[in-house]
Image (cartoon, rainbow, N blue to C red):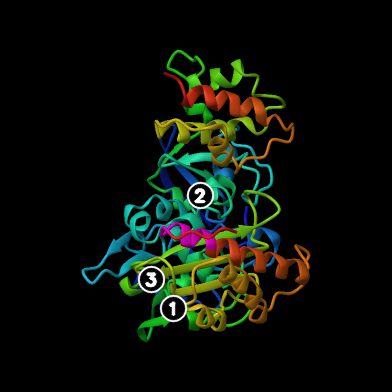
Amino acid sequence: MYDLGSIYQARAIEDAIRALRERPGSKLINGGTDVLVQVREGRLAGVSLVSIHNLEELKGVRLEADGTIVIGSGTTFSQITGNAIIQKYIPMLGEAVDQVGGPQIRNVGTIGGNVCNGVTSADSGSTLMVYNAVMVVQGSEGIRHISIHDWYAGPSKTVLKPDEVLLNIQIRKEDYEGYTGQYLKYGKRQAMEIATLGCGVLVKLSADKEKAGDIRIAFGVAGPNPLRCRQTEEACRQRPVNRETALFISEQVLREIKPRDSWRASKEFREQIASEYAKRAFIQAVAKQGGEIDA
Amino acid sequence: MLKIIKLFVNGKEEEVAIDERESLADVLRYRLGITSVKKGCEVGECGACTVLVDREAVDSCIYLALWAEGKHILTVEGLKSPTGELSEIQQAFVDAAAVQCGFCTPGIIMSAVEIIEKQKSYSREELKKMISGHLCRCTGYENIITALEGLVNKE
């Protein structure tokens, strides 16, 4: 049996918000693959829960008329990977979340939980950063739209207020149309692993596939939160798509990341992986768009 | 405080009084006597407690029992035929000597049920990924993959 206080099963989003307001200190739970483990470990021992596990209104992926992709926060990793809209328009996200934990975890864990726990190692983090995702949250004071770039607030922290629920994650058409991307995860094992480092690169090439029209680079576990390398991105725009640019990226990202030592890996090792993975992810993202780089 | 929930376990409707703080693994084992559900790590890493919830493989040790209200749970006990014979998957595990101490076996068999229901064929590499949520401390993975390979690539 878990060491838990009370458990409230919300019947609707408004019901969950009310319960969170009336029961200060309660923790929101959806899939539970992080929360219940933390209860078991003792870190969240005795906590009271507000469960949104079975709320159908938070599940599923839809495509809006203007091309915006709306991903319900309660959508599981395996549902995202298997979803036709994701596969067609933003396959990078489906591939990234297919690297979370193992199959049983992916059948239960949700993308909302992955971003609401605020951890830098979340496999969806780098990908949502490069797609400029917008988080839509609802609380007592109404609905807020928050850019993923304003979402994180330090280690395992987000700007989500105690009585707010993440409703969905939105990716706009201008942020995915014409882009291809690659997420690479480094871990000692190939499964059931928390990223030692994660790197996501999204590119849009010029019409002749010779130049980088736009490039976006993000990392997980290269700082307290997932982060973008804006200066490197800016410096790469309109550069030719070739080996020199790939090497340039691998050097430049080191100026913008802030990895640290942990029991999983040293700072130096993380820098080495970040440098190599930025290059590889760039080359692979370019290849998906028909560009070619001899590495 | 006890709460009464209704759920379907191996096709049979059950009404069971649970403590809200219990995991699905706790309820299946201690309240319903379904002991094929093993408790190994209890943090969702080893896969020994894997059951199907509405046809999806989940780690029942990190799944609150109250979430299972109204849902269909399948465990190894629900696989045998009406005359008590082993299912095709269980027989394949026996034939491939994919069972050593047996502790991980019920969980892996439930993942195998989910894999085989997809009715697709898979390579050994793909199968390895599909059972990566299970640990076998006897390290008998090769025979387990061989059993699965025979099942998914059958003509």
Magenta stretch, overall SS = helix
- Residue B9, x across and y down, in percent: 44, 36
Which element carries disc 1, helix, strand or loop? loop
- In front: A232, or B55? A232
Distance in Å between CA atoms under marks 3 and 2: 53 Å
Which residue does the numbered mark 3 point to in the structure image? Answer: A206
Q: Quadrant of residue A213?
A: bottom left
Which residue does the numbered mark 2 point to in the structure image? Answer: B65
Vertical side of A270 occupied by A138: above or below: below
- Residue A216, x across and y down, in percent: 49, 74
Residue A218 seen in this snapshot: yes
- Residue A6, x across and y down, in percent: 54, 66
The crowding category of the residue bearing disc 2, from other C-alpha atoms within 10 Å (few below 14, some 14 to 19, many at least 20), is many
Disc 1 residue type (three-letter): Glu
Disc 2 residue type (three-letter): Ala
Q: Is residue B15 left or right of residue B64?
A: left
Residue interval drawn in magenta: A283-290
The crowding category of the residue bearing disc 3, from other C-alpha atoms within 10 Å (few below 14, some 14 to 19, many at least 20), is some
- In front: B27, or A79? A79
Vertical side of A84 occupied by A3: above or below: below
- In front: A9, or A183? A183
- Residue B92, x across and y down, in percent: 55, 19
**Residue shown at 72% from the left, 67% from the top:** A272
Which element carries disc 2, helix, strand or loop? helix
Residue B31 seen in this snapshot: no
Which residue does the numbered mark 1 point to in the structure image? Answer: A164
Q: Is residue B148 magenta?
A: no
Which residue is situated farthest in the left direction here?
A65
Disc 3 residue type (three-letter): Ser
Q: Quadrant of residue A119?
A: bottom right
The crowding category of the residue bearing disc 1, from other C-alpha atoms within 10 Å (few below 14, some 14 to 19, many at least 20), is many
